[in-house]
Image: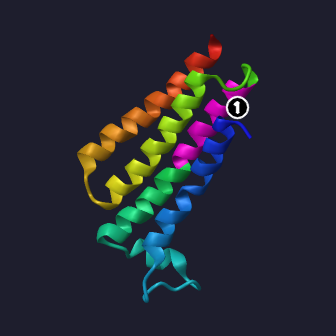
Amino acid sequence: MTIPHLCLLIVALLPFPWTMLAKVSKRYDNAAPRPYLASLEGWRARAHAAHQNAWEALAMFTAAIVVTGQAGGSSPWINGLAITFVVTRVVYGVLYVANLATLRSLVWFVGVACVVSMFFVSVN
């Protein structure tokens, strides 16, 4: 497994820790999870939002991994960008739950820049 493929696996699994944080409660009803999630407030609501955002980020990162693979696979630049993206996604989720919105947005921007860069680096 290449580094970009490993990073893709990690990014694909990242939604689950955030949803587990949102759902770990005696009030959680597995028979009706959506009403429970819709009623969340505070850090649990932010954990659920981080969960949803992790799914959104997965699509963009998957596209970048496919493009880099079609262009010849991994390189030191691609590897570094993929690893940096994974780190930004973990930090992003932590900042989301911690309610540090401005810093979270800056980290999000770094992650997006990594993905966009992967498209350009794979062309060369």
Please report the bounds of the magenta region as a residue range. 56-69
Give the amino acid at mark 1. Val
Left or right: 43, with 114 as reference point: left
Dominant secondary structure of the residues highlighted in magenta in the image: helix
Identified at 63% across, 10% down, the residue is 124
Residue 32 is one of the magenta-drawn residues: no
Question: Which of the 4 image quarters holds residue 59?
Answer: top right
- Reading the image, the residue beneath label 1 is 66
Q: Is residue 49 left or right of residue 74?
A: left
Query: Where does residue 52 sit, x and y in percent of width and height?
Result: 49, 57
Which residue appears farthest toward the top when viewing the image? Answer: 124
Q: Report the quarter where the N terminus lies.
A: top right
Residue drawn where x is 27% and y is 44% of the image:
103
Whole-percent x, y for residue 66 in the image: 70, 31
Residue at left offset 54%, top offset 55%: 14
Height in image: 97 above or below 73?
A: below
* Left or right of 89 in this view: 71: right
**Residue that protrudes farthest toward the bottom in the picture:** 26
Position in image of residue 19 (x %, y %): 50, 67
- Identify the residue at image location x=46%, y=46%: 89
In the shown orientation, is residue 23 left or right of residue 124? left
SS for dot 1: helix
Q: Where does the image place residue 83, in percent across and percent down from the top left?
A: 53, 37
- The colour style of the image is rainbow
Tell how many labels: 1
Q: Is residue 94 above or below residue 116?
A: below
- Mark 1 is surrounded, within 10 Å at the Cα level, by few (under 14), some (14 to 19) or many (20 or more) other residues, namely some
